Every structure is written in C-alpha cells, then in structure tokens.
Image: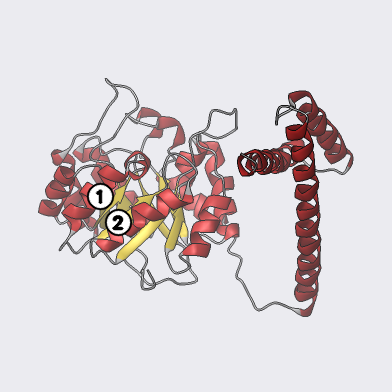
Amino acid sequence: MTDLKPLFTELSTEPLYIAGPCSAESREQVLLAARDIAQAGISIFRAGAWKPRTKPGSFEGTGREALEWLREAKERYGIKVITEIATPEHLEEVLKYDIDGVWIGARTTTNPFATQQIADALKGVDTAVIVKNPVIPDVDLWIGAIERIYNSGIRRLAAVHRGFGTQQTTPYRNAPHWSVPIELHRRIPNLCILSDPSHIGGRRELIARLSQQALDIGFDGLMIECHPTPECALSDAAQQITPDALVELISKLELHRTPAATDALSEYRLHIDTIDSKIIELLAERMYIARAIGEYKHAHGMAVVQQDRYNELLLAAEARAESANLPPRFIHQIFREIHEESVRQQINIREEQK
C-alpha cells in the first residue's frame, strides 16, 4: 500500500476541511448548509443520507431522496459532496446521483464482513472513499478495512479518526486514543488522515480545542459537522456548529509546520533516546524478576495473580506519580500493562513445565 492518495487532492501543507450537517434532513436544509459552507471557502460538503442509529425510532435519514438534494447542492454551488454508505445497496444508489465520494462509518468498519461486501461492490468503481476508525481502538482492524477497500481497486483513500467507544467516564463522547491514528500514520505514512472533532467531543464547545489538538499532532485536516440551525437538528444536535462558528473556528486554528531538526532539538531527541534505552533495560530486568517470582509461586503451589499485592503496587505507583507531578491515570495505565505482561510471563512458566 505505497501509492495511497488523499481524498480529492494531493497532500499539501494546508489542511483539508470537510463540513456539513450530520444528516440531510430536507432539501431546504441541505441547500442552505451547502451555500454557507461553499461561501466559507470549503470545497467538500458532507451529509448523511442514511444514519445508522443506536436505537430504533431515531431519525435514520431520508435515503435516496437526500441524494437528489446533494446532487443539486453540487450543481448549484460547485462543491464536492460525500455521504455515508453501510451496504452495497447504498453504494448502488449513490452512484446514480454523481456523488463525489463516500465514507464508511465506525460501525461498518468494525464488521469485516460488512466492509468486505462494500469492497466487493466497489470493484471497478472510480470514487473516493473515507474509512472511519472502528468503534474499538484496534489499529489492525482499521488497517484491515482500509486494505479491503484498497484491494478493490480504490486509490483515492482517506481515513477519519472519530474517536472510540468507552465505558469510562470522560469529557468526550468518544475517547480520542490519539495513539491509534498516530500508529496508523506510522504504518501507512502517505495516507491522508483527518480528524472528526464533532464525534470525538460530542459537544460543540469541545470542537475547537479538539481541532487544534488534531492539527498539532499532524493530521491532514478536519471533518466537522455544521448545521444552519444546530439546535433543531434531527440527529446529533449537541455536536454541530453553525457555518459562522465554523468560519471563526478555522480562522483561529494555528498551523505548526515541521522544519528540519535544529541542534537543540537534536540534543533533546538524543536525551530521549538515552532515557528510552534505560526504560527498556529496566523493563527487561523487571520481567526477569517476575519470571523468578513465577517459578517460586509455581514451586510452592501459589496462584499467579495476588490481587492484594497488585493493589499495593498500583497505590504506591500512583502516590509516587502524584509526588512527581505525573497524572495517576497515566501511571495506572503503564503499570497495568506491565502487570499483564508479568502475569503472561508467569503463566508461560507453568505451560513450559507441564
């Protein structure tokens, strides 16, 4: 996958912006939103014709009729239009209306069978395809969906990071887990990756901050939900902003370039490399001790996991983290991973000695 190209345009130093309402609700709403977004200088308009919803009875889009409105918006305002598809039948309908591209939503990306069905339907089709991340933070599942679309012959490909479902209490609708799209970029460096701050935040007041964070990390652009009257939206009203708010948001975004490393930056990086080497050495030493403990437990008929001891480790680590001005959540996550690997090493010992 070395010749992937971004949606509609070659990668450049300027961010790519896509905007439009969550759902295409009416002809009037689509045309009004498209007009305002075109006037804002944004060339790609998004609106969902079909909306996969969590609960039955919610507004699920207007379907084929919405495609007529999108085509009219394209002809009237000279913008490209895209919409979501979740089935081969959706794609078949989209191709009848000169729609410029489609996106595959998180629920569909999560299901390899559904993604493959769409990939099969895309064979021989010349269109642009955006693949949103799966519901769970699994970069391999995301890459798998992208590869399925790529293998169908599609070359105008992009990915959208829209956050991940979580059972934990966070300020966001979907946890960002920035490490996942960062890893996607490392694995497919020439793939255009956009961020969807509307779905990550779930609230319009979070969109600006999340947009800036995405650009700071190095995303190629943003996909933002924008509605003429967000408070009246039939779906996801809380996470949509007005066209005026969109213009203001974009005007305030700071773009940080990536120049060649200076001597000072090179020195910092060398320091980081030295520290990372020490961390790896210490982890190796810790796992050596963990295996010794595992052998002792096995020899004396003890269970692998000693929950009280694990709780003591976590509490002590979090206390040290707080005194070192480190977030306890961050340290908790690191020690959880270390503990899981220690448990795996100790279980292996028992398997080896069977």
The C terminus lies in quadrant: top right
Which mark identifies residue 148? 2
Left or right: 312 in relation to 74: right
Residue 138 appears left or right of 46: right
Q: Closer to the N terminus: mark 1 or mark 2?
A: 1
Looking at this view, name the residue that lies furthest to the front: 354
- Image coordinates for residue 200, horizontal then vertical, percent: 50, 40
Who's the residue at 87% across and 38% down the image? 320
Is residue 38 visible in the rendered image? The answer is no
Q: Report x, y in % for residue 275.
A: 80, 62
Amino acid type at mark 1:
Gln
Question: Where does residue 274 sit, x and y in percent of width and height?
Answer: 80, 67
Q: Secondary structure at mark 2?
A: helix
Categorize mark 1 by other alpha carbons within 10 Å: few (<14), some (14-19), many (20+): many
Identify the residue position indicated by label 1 in the image. 116
Q: In the rendered view, would you say 125 is above or below 210?
A: below
